[in-house]
């Protein structure tokens, strides 16, 4: 079993597996490193209805199983492990796993994804998939005619609140400060929506519900003399407080933006390290969709192939 490849792919979400399918079919014999959450964020999703090709929708884990099987069919060599060290300084890239295995590669595609940020309340995990979600585009459809809350005051929160306002009966936007951080245009759109109620200076203290989510305990002006606790009845609780890209191990090896996402030279997927490419949520703070990650994975494999041809 060789530990050298023309193309090493790190991560097995939609971007990683799509890159693996393309790289395998291009005879690059990719080795794919499957990390701590094989299949990525979709493994924790229930039904996915917006991935093209699945007329009746598909369960997130099933979608990832299909992508994995498709990558294996073309010969992708999938290995498990957590990348603990990388050296992208030379023509031959070095990647070391926590267990000690070492890989060398002529090109690398980073697809390590991002993790939605949660508030850290124990109740969030309890109701995950039972009312708690970090993706309105993925799960909003299940809340048609219901009452939901979105947490956050940035562009994502406003966008998610607007998206949900077209489906849900009512949307609470829970904002911890007394103003929105979002762009002016997004703020205006949110304020113009009659069924969005913004709860400023409000924090979520907890969630409740018999079996599924039924409401949230919130507090206004928490920690001040004007502190006020009350409950809101909601069926859905959407986190939109940002994403944390999984880039810690690449710090110093490729350029990151101020939020930690890998910078790519769009429209290419090239990073600041020659021969190293990035695709999916790890390099895309904006779209964060399975299909856009898959598309970027395809582009990264094509970019890697072109790079290798130029080096030959
Ligand atoms: P942001 O970092 O811009 O906003 C995060 C929001 O979550 C802030 O309002 C922040 O509050 C709040 N927040 C963070 N932690 C907590 C917490 N523990 N409790 C309560 N609230 C919390 O992230 P976004 O995902 O909104 O945006 C990321 C980037 O993507 C931005 O540059 C944005 O402009 C861009 N984007 C652009 C879009 C567009 O143009 N259509 C759409 C989506 C994203 P506080 O303000 O108090 O810090």
Image: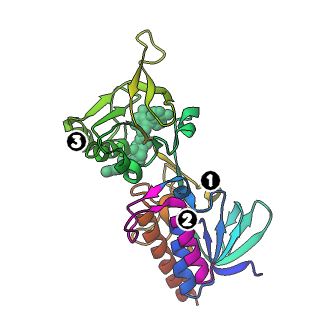
The residue indicated by pointer 3 is 189
Where is residue 84, by image quadrant?
bottom right
Q: Residue at x 65, y 65 (%)?
A: 34
Q: Earlier in the sequence, mark 3 or mark 1?
A: 3
In the image: residue 97, left or right of residue 113? right
Q: Which mark is residue 111?
A: 2
Location of residue 93 in the rendering, given as x and y in whole percent from the top left corner: 67, 73
Location of residue 261 in the rendering, given as x and y in whole percent from the top left corner: 50, 55
Q: Residue at x 40, y 36 (%)?
A: 235
Write down the region rendered in magenta: 47-76
Location of residue 189 in the rendering, given as x and y in whole percent from the top left corner: 22, 42
Where does the C terminus fall, quadrant-wise? bottom right
Gap in Å between the C-alphas at discs 1 and 2?
Answer: 13 Å
Q: Earlier in the sequence, mark 1 or mark 2?
A: 2
* Tag 2 near tag 3, CB within 8 Å: no
Q: Is residue 69 above or below residue 40?
A: below
Q: Which mark is residue 248?
A: 1
């Amino acid at each position: 079993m060789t530990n050298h490849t023309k193309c090493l792919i790190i991560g097995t979400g939609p971007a990683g597996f799509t890159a693996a399918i393309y790289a395998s079919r291009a005879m690059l014999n990719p080795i794919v490193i499957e990390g701590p959450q094989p299949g990525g964020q979709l493994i924790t999703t229930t039904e996915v209805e917006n991935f093209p090709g699945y007329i009746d929708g598909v369960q997130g884990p099933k979608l990832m199983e299909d992508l994995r099987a498709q990558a294996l069919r073309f010969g992708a060599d999938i290995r498990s492990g957590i990348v603990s060290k990388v050296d992208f300084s030379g023509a031959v890239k070095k990647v070391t796993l926590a267990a000690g295995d070492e890989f060398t590669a002529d090109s690398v595609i980073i697809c390590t994804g991002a993790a939605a940020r949660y508030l850290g309340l124990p109740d969030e995990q309890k109701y995950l998939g039972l009312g708690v979600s970090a993706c309105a585009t993925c799960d909003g459809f299940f809340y048609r005619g219901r009452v939901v809350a979105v947490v956050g005051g940035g562009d994502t929160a406003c966008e998610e609140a607007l998206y949900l306002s077209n489906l849900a009966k009512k949307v609470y936007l829970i904002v911890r400060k007394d103003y929105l951080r979002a762009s002016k245009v997004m703020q205006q759109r949110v304020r113009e929506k009659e069924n969005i109620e913004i709860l400023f200076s409000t924090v979520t203290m907890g969630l409740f519900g018999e079996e599924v989510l039924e409401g949230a305990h919130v507090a206004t002006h928490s920690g001040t003399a004007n502190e006020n606790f009350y409950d809101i009845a909601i069926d859905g609780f959407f986190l939109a407080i940002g994403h944390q890209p999984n880039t810690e191990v690449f710090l110093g090896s490729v350029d990151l933006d101020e939020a930690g996402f890998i910078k790519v030279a769009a429209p290419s997927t090239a990073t600041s390290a020659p021969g190293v490419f990035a695709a999916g949520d790890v390099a895309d703070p904006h779209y964060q969709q399975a299909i856009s990650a898959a598309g970027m994975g395809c582009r990264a494999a094509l970019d890697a192939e072109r790079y290798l041809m130029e080096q030959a």
